[in-house]
Image (cartoon, helix red, strand yellow):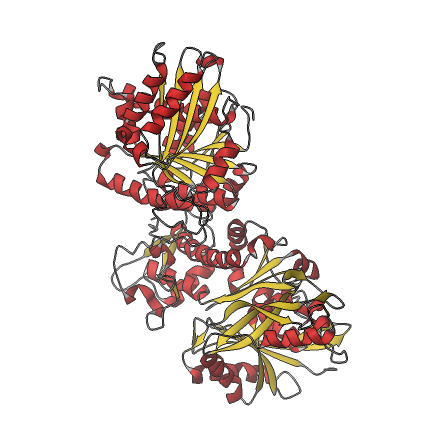
Amino acid sequence: MAYHPIVAVEIGTSRTVVMVGVSIGRGEIRIEETSTEVTNGMCKGGIVSLPDVQKSLQNAIGKLQGKIAIKISSIVLGVSDPSITSMVNDSVKHFPEGDHLVIGDDLEEVNNMASAVALPAGYDLMHSFPLCYSLNGRQGIVNPINMHGASLGLKTLSLAIAHDRVDNIMRVPISCGLEAEGAFTGLAAAHAVLTEDQKQRGVAVIDLGGGTTKYVSCEGGIITTAGVLGIGGDHVTNDLAIAFKCTTPEAEAMKLKKGSATIDPAVASERYSLPKDIVSGGRFASVRAIHTVINARMDEIFRLIRAEMNDSGALGRIGAGVVLTGGGAQMPNVCALASDIFGCPATIGAPVNVRGLEGVANPASLASAAGLVIQGAGYGLDESETSNAVSKFLKGIFGQ
Amino acid sequence: MNNEDNSFVLVGVGGAGCRIAAAAVDSFGPGLKALGFDSDALESRQIESFRCSVLGASRLDGRGTGGDRVNGKLAAQDDAQRIREALTGARTVVVVCGLGGGFGGGATPEIIHLAREAGMTTLCFATLPFSFEGAKRRSEADRAVALLEENSDALAVIPLDDLFADANPDGDLALLEATARATTLLADAISVFWRLLLTPGFVRFNPDDLNALLRSGGGRFRFAVSESSDPANRASAAVKAIVGSKLMRGGASLSDSNTIVLGVLGGEDLRLNELSIASSGITSACRQGCALHLGTVLDRRFDGSIRLVALAFENWRASAGDAPEELVVPEQQTPRKSRSRSNPRSKLGFGTLGLGRFRQTAPTMHGNDNLDEPTYLRRGITLPR
């Protein structure tokens, strides 16, 4: 490889993805290798058995190591723990002299104040997204440089994670001899699949994982909502297993073969043969019933996210619609359901901002890993530039 | 404001609601914009006065809900976008439905919720089943009333027993005729209310006034309509009929009310003192300090008679910070976004058994809901065979 590779790792509840990409110049990233491994030891996005998760990562890294020349020593690690919570904070700097001309140092200072935001007890700051500046209490200021005011404020959306959770998560790569930098997988997915037009017009990205569902919305290039639900595709499978009294693998097979996020009238009258059990002979489930179970759960997931976006005021600001990624985006009719609930177009998101994934099956399921590679490349923050606060802000969060 | 105000829409929900709405349209004549929703394709085709859309076809195949309120709710949720499109352009939505069955009680709260989300003011007329229909139907209706109250700006709950009694005071009509008369009475009442709002009068009470009233508060209300052609005494007779009506609980709803909307509809022969008699007659039946909102309609069709329509708000729910001193606010206004969800528990009543692979993990809680429990169970959805 001509350039230093970036290694991204997403340890999902169902599978671990390791992806290697390189920056090939002209602002482009190419994915060179990808490996996936079944994850053991995770449930609902949280670690339940550290040794099992460590082994899953070791296996995934081992599979990939054989394909690339250099030794993997540092990674970008995707984090999607359900303890992740978001909050909006205001930082305000008052100028004693009253009428002050705002300069770059003032912005640095107020940005630093925003980073020192008060968090819930036991939580660490993950990301801080600038929303807008304010001058003398007037919101919506994009660039306050050379403007006058008695006070300068910055509203930020902060993502925080429980300290003990992130501690345990970071032990996993450390135990494999890897240095790791953590990043929110919801944001990573957005990095991978969104175009500039979508980011400006307003869009929501929903990453439907096995254990968790992550969501991010933005408008004008600025993040407006972000969060994690501790429910995902595994809950769909579990609902089916309980409804039809079958094992989890049987329910998973049912979901893959006959699943639909809405009740599909074309096939609803069909019957699905369930495995025989000791007591009874052949059992059947109506496909309508299967769709009903799945629809209830998927509907709930989307409505919970919709409620969060409504509370934050972001719901009416997604003119470009909803983009779905993750394994759950493969579910038939999932776009139709999302479109109904959010009242706007919904599409499957493919990682359009990287090369090298064009021929893969289900590229949407690799969106988070691809986005972690983009973040690992530090894309948008060229090290040769002086990174000042205004530059960061004007590029929007997607420049960070 | 003319008779064709497209921002004001009557919506019939379910079989009973659509029949009443159709009768109201027939009574009013041209100019009453109406539409309907039902899950039963056969019943919806029988409505000729307006377009009745079938909801939930992918789930119910164009059949009824079988009395299952959850199915009615899901049918409305399945076609939420179509409901939004059908209501586009409306500013005020007046919904009429029958409770106790499946579609009316299940879909109506969803439809009203969608209308409210779109910024529309919502007014709902909901009938309660006859007492002879049994306790189960009544219990279903009561559960639906709670949801309607939470979602609508104003709600009139109309016991069919009372409507029937007003339509057949002597009890001498045959069942079919009395039932038809009860439907007509309610439809006529809605039609008269519509006429009050859409027809300019000497004292105006139009949709803007109604919207302003409801946006400043709202709540449950009772309503009644009366008519008198007694040449010597028509105003007093009409007042007496309102005060004594079963729908007004024999006048108790007036005396309990803090806010009254009174419409007086008469012909060109309506006299000023008749207006005064009607107004004072109603307010004398109310408590002191009750706020009266008066509107009149003069229409030659009503020559020789006087009609009164009264809405008595029984528990006025004023907006926070807006409540004037003389109004009593018996309960806090429920914030729109924090709706308490009903949480139907599984009939099986199992504990951790119903959690499957998540039974050993810490629960994923959202409010009072354990999200690890299957959603279809928590929502009370009966799986089809």
> In the picture, residue B248 is in which quadrant?
top left
Residue pictured at 26% horizontal, 25% vertical: B165
Residue nearest the viewer, comparing B238 with A313: B238
> In the picture, residue B218 is in which quadrant?
top left
Residue nearest the viewer, comparing A376 with B28: B28
Residue pictured at 42% horizontal, 61% vertical: A236
- Where does the image place residue B57, in percent across and percent down from the top left? 44, 41
Q: Is residue A266 above or below residue A277?
A: above
Q: Is residue A242 above or below residue B121?
A: below
Q: How many marks on residues?
A: 0
Q: Is the N terminus of chain B in the top left, top right, bottom left or bottom right quadrant?
A: top right
Residue pictured at 49% horizontal, 85% vertical: A171
- Where does the image place residue B370, in percent across and percent down from the top left? 36, 63
- Where does the image place residue B196, in percent across and percent down from the top left? 47, 25
> In the picture, residue A300 is in which quadrant?
bottom left
Q: Is residue B328 above or below residue A33?
A: above
Residue B118, visible in the rendered structure: yes
- Where does the image place residue A385, in percent across and percent down from the top left? 76, 78
Residue A379, visible in the rendered structure: no
Is A390 situated left or right of B55 in this image? right
